[in-house]
Image: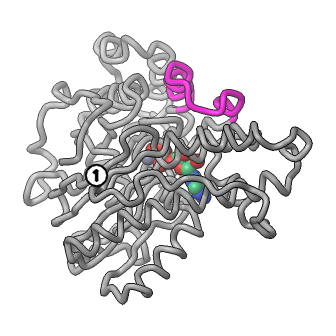
Amino acid sequence: MKILSIETSCDDTGIAVLEISKNGDFNILSNIVASQIKVHQKYGGVYPAMAKREHQKNLIPTFIKALRKSNLLKNNELKQNFDFQSLNNILEREPELYKNLVSFLKKYTKPNIDLIAVTNGPGLEPCLWVGVNFAKAISFAWNIPVVPANHIEGHILVNLLNPKPYTLNPTLFPAIALVVSGGHTQIILVKKIGSYKILGETRDDAAGECFDKCAKILGLGYPGGPIIAKMAEKVGGMSDVPPLPRPMINTKDYDFSFSGLKTAVLYADRKVDPSTRLRASYKRKMSAEVQQAIIDVLIKKTIKAVKDFKVKSLILGGGVSANQELKKQFQLEIEKNKLKVKLIYPAPNLSTDNGAMIAVAGFYHLPAGRQVKKLANWKKINANGNLRID
Ligand code: KG4
Ligand code: ZN
């Protein structure tokens, strides 16, 4: 079976094609991501209206690249006709995308795809709708069923693609998942695939958002996570930066709060004289301290959940799980506590938003027996910015 997946929940336009064999092995045929980093860079964050426009522009070119890489892009020699009026109605709010899709449909023929999976939440709702409406339009045009997928579940289940040969390992569950991205910070109890309970989450900023905001204050650029990580690598001694707080590190729940950290960075920044503030050595030390403060809180709360629920594995996911130091320190903490838990995290390109993660989540939401033909009508799929996993 081949799944085409669409991800537009934030600032990355992701399209992937995965082939799933009868025994459940996944094979990534293509996983193309069009990043909007350049567009949002000057603002130090994502602007939803602008992100929506970029998705409209990027979807068809990304789609073409993904199909071509999967060897599924074929010219429309049959000159198949479409009900363009209905397609126009589906894409009423995405006129640019409609125009691009019409040219695409006239040029290329229906690819050999069995199912479409699309992110329907959580995320930025205007962005989610672009992906959902695109999925509905191609589903209608080519008569291919669609299944909605939860973005957070995608960040967890993408771990089933890693390591090769992409086989599901049933001994992983129950597990604790830490999903840390630009929009989310959640500790989730995964009883098995499809059965989740959010144990705790951030009460304000997400961990990735904290990286991004602190980087902006330090004048380091966007997205902040990878830049701060790089700066922190080159740090010398830590003596002349003030220690930052570790918000909520000792509370008995599994919740987080990161907004105070950026305020602390701002105050620290104001206290030092301007010449120090501009020095690379100061920025490196602050970067290392910001990174460590975030890591300390994430590790303390997540390891507490691992112990409390006596799980078999600890699964990381989301953009921040690309952070080397976070992964290294989690492993050390597991060893220090002599925990019999397996640490699992995605390859860096599967940590950040991508289409492949949505194909996996979509696949596991097919009805028992994986009968794609029995799926609900595509008209009923809605985007929901606040969609929960539990
Ligand atoms: O999962 P993701 O691609 O998008 C969302 O769903 O939000 O995560 C993006 C976030 C950004 O905040 C970015 O700064 C952060 O992940 N990030 C990192 C690293 N790479 C990306 N944070 C820390 N260290 C990294 N290496
Ligand atoms: Zn994400």
Residue 175 position (above or below residue 139) = below
Residue 328 position (above or below residue 268) = below
Give the labeled residue for mark 1: 200
**In the rendering, at what x and y percent does residue 312 appear?**
25, 79
Query: Is 170 left or right of 7, judged from the image as shown?
Result: left
Visible residue check, residue 3: no
Q: Main secondary structure of the magenta part?
A: helix
Q: Secondary structure at mark 1?
A: strand
Q: Is residue 213 magenta?
A: no
Extent of the magenta region: 38-58
- Residue appearing at x 76%, y 40% in the figure: 271
**Quarter of the figure that contains the N terminus:** bottom left
- Residue appearing at x 25%, y 36% in the figure: 387
- Residue appearing at x 44%, y 69% in the figure: 345
Residue 377 position (above or below residue 114) = above
- Residue appearing at x 71%, y 54% in the figure: 286
Visible residue check, residue 59: yes
